[in-house]
Amino acid sequence: YHISATEFVRFIQCQRQFVFSMIAKKCSIDIQDTEGVINTRNGSFKHRIFEVAAQQKDFVSLDAEKVLKVLKDSTEQVLNEFDISQFFLGTKETLLTQIEKHEMPLFAKNEVERQKKYNLTVQDTEKKFFYEIPGTDFGISCKFDRIDKSSDNKIFLWDYKMGHPKKDIISFVMPQKKVLENNDRSIQRALYMYIYDKLFNFKNLYGANIYINGRDNLGEESYNPEIENLLNKSIEYFKTALNNNIDVLSLTNTEICNGGSNCVYCGFNYACKIID
């Protein structure tokens, strides 16, 4: 069996949400509203543009105009793969204007800054990995949006984002309540670095978000021993939960979530209210 990195993060933050989401997945129940579906498709479209662009030699360049041309050419190619009516309420021309006039110039500028800072080479895009959890029949699958290598042998795991930069709050609820605030850290990004290290025994890792809308990211995060320790404990707890068939529905709300901080955007909070 395999679960995605996103699903494992759900387990860390709230076991009920994890169980409910797995049931929904098994029963093909989509809890996203129309706006959520459109945003997901929009994200897939833009991810595909940058996947195609990263395969071109001029994408990693000190010349912003070259980067911009690669992005525009890639957009034209990807537009032939998608039905834009499924994710954009407007014409093809309007979409191109939005992307080419507003998002891409800022992205190209930031891409040049990254290149100046690290002298990067794109190693892979949309790369899938699978980590088998020792002692279980489960594994965690993940997909890195882009993997770069710097001239001084650092590996960068980039995660493309559609939204706006923000300070993430990492909340490890199980196996112990642990909140790390104001650290610009993402559990999922930390999990990606953890899996990369487990697979390749390589710790000179950095991870960061790249915002497709061109807004500056918050900087790169190095592989953090404290996060690694918490993920080790979380995986051990996951194994314990599987082996002992823990009934998450019998746990109280305060036992499974950090004071409700993860409930606001949860699509299953109505189910919790029924149970509680």
Image: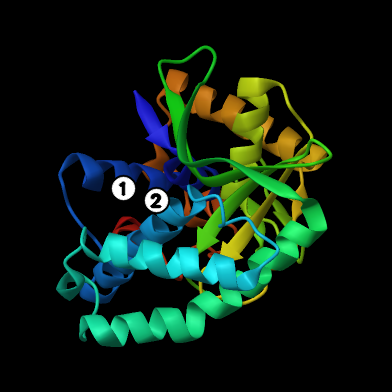
Q: Secondary structure at mark 2?
A: helix
Residue situated in front as seen by the camera: 25 or 188: 188
Q: How is the image coloured?
A: rainbow
Residue 128 occupies which quadrant of the picture?
A: top left
Image location of residue 56, percent across then percent down: 49, 51
**Is disc 1 surrounded by few (<14), some (14 to 19) or many (20+) residues within 10 Å?**
some
Kindly identify the amino acid type of the residue bearing the numbered disc 2.
Answer: Gln
Q: Residue furthest top?
A: 135
Image location of residue 180, percent across then percent down: 74, 57
Q: Is residue 12 above or below residue 235?
A: below
**At 31% from the left edge and 67% from the top edge, which residue is drawn?**
76
Residue situated in front as seen by the camera: 195 or 14: 195
Kindly identify the amino acid type of the residue bearing the numbered disc 1.
Answer: Phe
Residue 269 shows in this picture = no
**Is disc 2 surrounded by few (<14), some (14 to 19) or many (20+) residues within 10 Å?**
many
Along the horizontal axis of the image, is 158 left or right of 252? right
Which numbered disc covers residue 226? none
Marks 1 and 2 sit apart, C-alpha to C-alpha, by 5 Å
**At 39% from the left edge and 85% from the top edge, which residue is drawn?**
98
**At 71% from the left edge and 56% from the top edge, which residue is drawn?**
179
Where the N terminus falls, by quadrant?
A: top left
- Circles 1 and 2: CB distance less than 8 Å? yes
For mark 1, what is the residue? 20
Q: Is residue 181 above or below residue 148?
A: below
Along the horizontal axis of the image, is 164 left or right of 152? left
Where the C terminus falls, by quadrant?
A: bottom left
Q: Secondary structure at mark 1?
A: helix
Q: Is residue 159 above or below residue 175?
A: below
Which numbered disc covers residue 17? 2
